[in-house]
Amino acid sequence: MGTPGQDNTPMYPEEQLHFGEEESYRGSPLLEERELKVDIRKIFNDLRNLDWSKVVWRNVVLFTLLHIYAVYGLYLAIVFVQWKTIIFSFMLVGMSALGITMGAHRLWAHRSYKAKFPLRFVLAVFQTIAFQNHIYEWARDHRVHHKHSETDADPHNARRGFFFSHMGWLMYKKHPDVIAKGRKLDMSDLERDPVVRFQRKHYLPLVLLLCFVFPAVIPWLFWGEHIVNALMVAAFLRYALVLHFTWTVNSLAHWVGIKPYDKHIYPSQNKIVTALTFGEGWHNYHHVFPWDYKTSEFGGFTEFNFTSFIIESCRFFGLAYDLTTVSKNLIAMRAERTGDGSYTYINDEDELCN
């Protein structure tokens, strides 16, 4: 854990945080009203003015191939694939999602709870199946995103457009500010974690094995699925779906939804994103209180927060501990001060208090 004033991940109440979340918006124009619509003329102008020398063509080609395979996998899933392979693919979706939400995000990026070695090991396996960069890089980029949200130092700055914040940022060279600010972060907690170190050192063979080989071989070996069907559905289609589910947090949840806790920032409460990501869509709350392990005001199934339910279950079995959260009074005070007026306070007895 760091101390107030350090350039690292938040772990303190709002009064002590010094995290810079609000500061990233100060001095900027008031947030413009935005709506999601397809503007062909704007798309054409953006492409014409794009600095093509900064396009990461390797990623463009790989993402193009992935989506071709995923579409073919969807066709196979509808027409040819065995039901066992479909169920197995959904299981992999769930494992991948928990690896990101419960592991890379809430545990390693925000340190909102602590986990014993067996749980960290399992979450690292799940996060590798998801193939969204190794834990160290994922957490570093996410910490920069929170500390410098919607600035040039934000890896997926929503001010640069919906597509950029969704997936375009992975096909374009990082802004120099992203790299510079990332180097200033205190990442010593992850550098000390043997699970993170091992995954980072052996990431390429691990991701090939767990994200592609394992999902393809298991259906073929255990219930006779055609190896191509298994690869296209359980590997490529499943991988593409999890990527897009994750990306909606950076895009859709920064564009659409209410802002009960802070109306001055882009992150919003979005139920669609929440349903797709096991509870990550209560994004206005999360950017205001990033150290809360629930990433929302309510945990468990109250707000489709499956990840919180699993964390709390792991605490029951002694695998997770030191879960950090926020008092209802602090939440209500912040909503009253900076919210958009949509917040409703619910006390400990679940009675509505206007």
Image (spheres, helix red, strand yellow):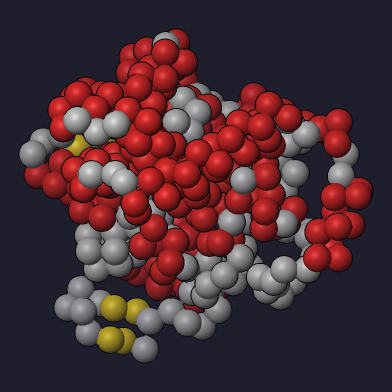
Q: Residue at x 15, y 41 (%)?
A: 314
In the rendered view, does 252 fall on the left or right side of 347?
right
Q: Residue at x 50, y 39 (%)?
A: 69
Above-or-below relation of 212 to 88: above
Above-or-below relation of 333 to 247: below
Q: Residue at x 23, y 44 (%)?
A: 82
As rendered, which of 272 and 236 lies closer to the eye?
A: 236
User: Quick check: can you spot residue 25?
Assistant: yes
Q: Return the x and y of residue 346 as percentages of the image width and height.
A: 29, 78
Q: Return the x and y of residue 7 as percentages of the image width and height.
A: 58, 33
As rendered, which of 104 and 167 lies closer to the eye?
A: 167
Q: Return the x and y of residue 170 as percentages of the image width and height.
A: 64, 37
Q: Residue at x 51, y 83 (%)?
A: 341
In the rendered view, does 208 fall on the left or right side of 113?
right
Q: How many marks?
A: 0
In the rendered view, does 25 fall on the left or right side of 142?
right
In the rendered view, does 84 fall on the left or right side of 65?
left
Q: Quadrant of residue 351 in the image?
A: bottom left
Position of the C terminus by quadrant: bottom left
Above-or-below relation of 6 to 288: above
Q: Return the x and y of residue 84 as percentages of the image width and height.
A: 19, 43
Q: Quadrant of residue 262 in the image?
A: bottom right
Position of the N terminus by quadrant: top left
User: Quick check: can you spot residue 193?
Assistant: no
As rendered, which of 136 and 205 lies closer to the eye?
A: 205
- Give the residue furthest to the left: 317
